[in-house]
Image (cartoon, rainbow, N blue to C red):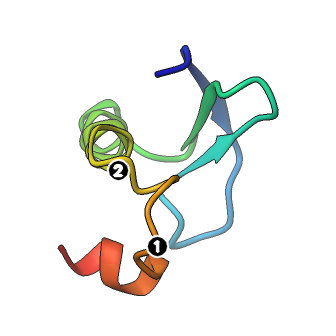
């Protein structure tokens, strides 16, 4: 597994976080800087679940991965 880099960024309303896999295999987690600390922590834990389940390498559609 690559490194995990976390950044705060202004994201669209309704988007708590997003993770982008870069060409080096690193995970870039962007947390919405408009959220409270607790909400950011929850969003980070949600993104970690995707990383731990290898959702970036499996063939599960994102809509289904979000429901699991």
- The residue located at (59%, 70%) in the rendering is 13
Q: Position of residue 36 (x, y in %)?
A: 36, 39
- The residue located at (68%, 56%) in the rendering is 11
Q: Position of residue 55 (x, y in %)?
A: 41, 56
Q: Position of residue 5 (x, y in %)?
A: 59, 18
Assess disc 2: are there few (<14), some (14-19) or many (≥20) residues with their C-alpha within 10 Å of its C-alpha. Answer: some
Using the image, tell me which numbered label, if any, was put on residue 50.
2
Q: Under tag 2, what secondary structure?
A: helix
* 1 in relation to 41, above or below: above
Locate residue 21 relative to residue 1 in the image: left or right: right
Q: Nearer the viewer, residue 10 or 42?
A: 42
What residue occupies the far left of the structure in this picture? 68
Earlier residue among tags 2 and 1: 2
Q: Under tag 1, what secondary structure?
A: loop
Using the image, tell me which numbered label, if any, was put on residue 30.
none
* 42 in relation to 66, above or below: above
Locate residue 31 relative to residue 45 in the image: left or right: right
**Residue 30 quadrant:** top right
The residue to which callout 1 is attached is 59
Q: CA distance from mark 2 to mark 1?
A: 13 Å
Assess disc 1: are there few (<14), some (14-19) or many (≥20) residues with their C-alpha within 10 Å of its C-alpha. Answer: few
């Amino acid at each position: 597994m690559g490194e995990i880099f976390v950044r705060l960024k202004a994201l669209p309303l309704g988007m708590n976080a997003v993770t982008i896999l870069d060409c080096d295999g690193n995970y870039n987690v962007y947390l919405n800087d408009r959220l409270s600390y607790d909400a950011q922590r929850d969003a980070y834990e949600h993104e970690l679940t995707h990383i731990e389940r290898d959702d970036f390498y499996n063939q599960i559609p994102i809509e289904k991965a979000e429901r699991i």
